[in-house]
Image: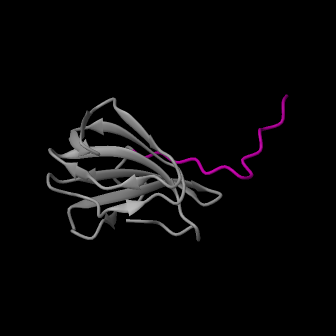
């Protein structure tokens, strides 16, 4: 019998059940919420749900950030993104335009300096 693989250093979660992970407010406008699905080395994987009109304030990415649209439509940096679209923002890139055009659900992978959640 093989030994069980070690889970040391792993954060594995299920995110499709209503009771699995708590929702937290996301953004300053009260138009979005998120579940932090996993964390490691200061990086976070967040499942975000946003109402139409949700927007982010302009900012500069201190670390790379990745986003995958699960459902809905958003305008990002002047480009329309829909389900199945993805972006990668390099460290140092300027993020000036992000607006939910319809109800939106996406996965965001990002890092914070102190390991705190953003939002």
Residue found 50% across the figure and 54% down from its top = 110
Q: In the image, 73: left or right of 96? A: left
* Residue 32 against residue 107 in the figure, above or below: below
Find residue 51 and report its image quarter: bottom left
Query: In x, y percent, where is residue 37?
Result: 48, 52
Residue found 25% across the figure and 59% down from its top = 32
Give the residues in magenta: 1-15
Query: In this view of the protein, can residue 61 be seen by the observer?
Result: yes
From the image, which quarter does the N terminus lie in? top right
From the image, which quarter does the C terminus lie in? bottom left
Query: In x, y percent, where is residue 66?
Result: 46, 44
SS majority, magenta: loop
Query: In x, y percent, where is residue 58?
Result: 32, 62
Is residue 98 one of those drawn in magenta?
Answer: no
Nearest the eye: 56 or 6: 56
Nearest the eye: 65 or 115: 65
Query: In this view of the protein, can residue 22 be seen by the observer?
Result: no
* Residue 59 against residue 84 in the figure, above or below: below
The colour scheme used here is: one colour
Is residue 8 one of those drawn in magenta?
Answer: yes
Nearest the eye: 39 or 65: 65
């Amino acid at each position: 019998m093989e030994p069980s693989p070690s889970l040391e250093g792993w954060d594995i979660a299920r995110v499709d059940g209503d009771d699995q992970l708590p929702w937290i407010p996301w953004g300053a406008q009260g138009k979005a919420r998120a579940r932090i699905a996993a964390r490691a080395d200061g990086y976070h994987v967040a499942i975000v749900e946003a109402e139409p009109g949700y927007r982010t304030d302009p900012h500069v990415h201190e670390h790379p950030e990745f986003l995958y649209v699960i459902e809905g439509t958003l305008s990002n940096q002047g480009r329309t993104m829909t389900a199945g679209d993805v972006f990668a923002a390099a460290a140092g890139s300027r993020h000036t335009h992000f607006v939910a055009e319809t109800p939106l659900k996406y996965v965001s992978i990002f890092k914070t300096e102190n390991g705190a959640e953003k939002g």
